[in-house]
Image: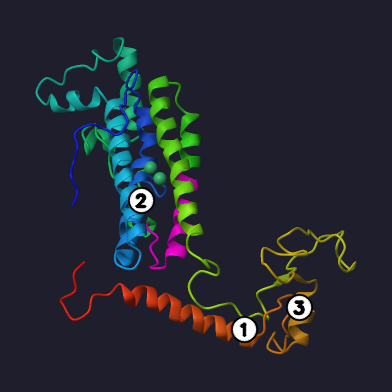
Amino acid sequence: MFHHVKELQFDVRVSEPDPRFARLLLEQFGGGNGELKAAMQYFTQAFTCRRAYPEKYDLLMDIATEEFSHLEIVGALITLLLDGVNPEMKNAVERSSLAHVMNGKAGKETFIHEALTNPQFLVLSGGGPTVTDSVGTPWSGNYVNANGDLSVDLRSNIAAESRAKIVYEYLMQFTDDEHVRDSLRFLMTREIAHFQMFSAALDTIQPNFPPGVLQGDPRFTHTYFNMSEDEAGRGRKGEGRTRGPWNDGQGPWDQGEWAFIDDPVRHVRETGGLTEQDILGSERSMRDVERMDQELSVQRSAEVTVSRPKRQALKF
Ligand code: MN
Ligand code: MN
């Protein structure tokens, strides 16, 4: 169950209204890397691990709930930044001026102009947040990545936290309000912390690569296809190629090396469209892979089956 506590997780303040920044901040309310996306992603992912991995269910629900708390903070900030729009909108009879927040007519004009950069603040939300990003695109469930495999989902979450962090970092360049910056720094820092939590959780799942159960075909796991060439490299085999640990020497494995296929067109032709290619780089045999597939299948299926109640009605 959810239980609402009236205090915000972080006490927010703003020095003065700033409709322009309110609009930018919508990115973290209803945008693709925002707080609602994060909350819904972790919330949605949690269901499939409730019984089999209860400790991960806790982690996902705790962080989802914190993200809802961040959504509340961002919504509060946006509303404060739009202060003046809201009460004035309610004054349907008087159409009184915004003078109490602005200095004189010019200030008022500026304020209205800035609010108009997102007309929805004026004509739809009445001075509160809208469930959109900063250009008015409605929030979408398509932002949510939940694939029912913890190693996949936790990696999606590490990526989501990275993006949320960098968006806060960018946003901080667009406000000088120290109070607003304090809140953004808090929100940004929590995304850093969540990144570490998801990384640590991923490490507890072993093996966690490749994602899922099935191993890769060892003929193709260690091959790098050189799909580009430049003037320097053309015609001089192996020279002028960009090499690094992603295609050269010992890869990120405990065994095997990268096989650099310098001329992929010729290689594909000579191997009957790769069907006759031998195992390159990898020290695994096809038989090894079959054995690992079976072992991991049994292990993963046992983890889930063991947690399943017998005979009685299913209980969440
Ligand atoms: Mn957050
Ligand atoms: Mn987060």
Q: Nearer the viewer, mark 2 or mark 3?
A: 2
> Which quarter of the figure has residue 274?
bottom right
Dot 1: what SS?
Answer: helix
Q: Give the answer, above or below, for where 11 lies relative to 96.
A: below
Say whether residue 93 is left or right of residue 102: left
**Residue carrying label 3:** 265
| Residue 134 in view (yes/no) | no
Q: Give the answer, above or below, for where 18 lies relative to 279.
A: above
Task: Residue type at mark 2: give it.
Answer: Lys
| Location of the C terminus (image quadrant) | bottom left
Q: CA distance from mark 3 to mark 1?
A: 29 Å
Where residue 58 appears, as percent x and y from the top left, is: 32, 54
Q: CA distance from mark 1 to mark 2?
A: 40 Å
Q: Nearer the viewer, mark 1 or mark 2?
A: 1
Question: Quadrant location of ligand 2?
Answer: top left
**Residue carrying label 2:** 37
Q: Residues within 10 Å of mark 2 (few under 14, many from 20)?
A: many
Dot 2: what SS?
Answer: helix
Q: Residues within 10 Å of mark 1 (few under 14, many from 20)?
A: few
> Which quarter of the figure has residue 79?
top left
**Residue carrying label 1:** 288
Q: Nearer the viewer, residue 193 or 247?
A: 193
Where residue 248 appears, as percent x and y from the top left, is: 77, 64
- Dot 3 or dot 1, earlier in sequence: 3
Task: Residue type at mark 1: give it.
Answer: Asp
Where residue 61 appears, as percent x and y from the top left, is: 31, 53
Residue range of the region highlighted in magenta in the rendering: 144-164
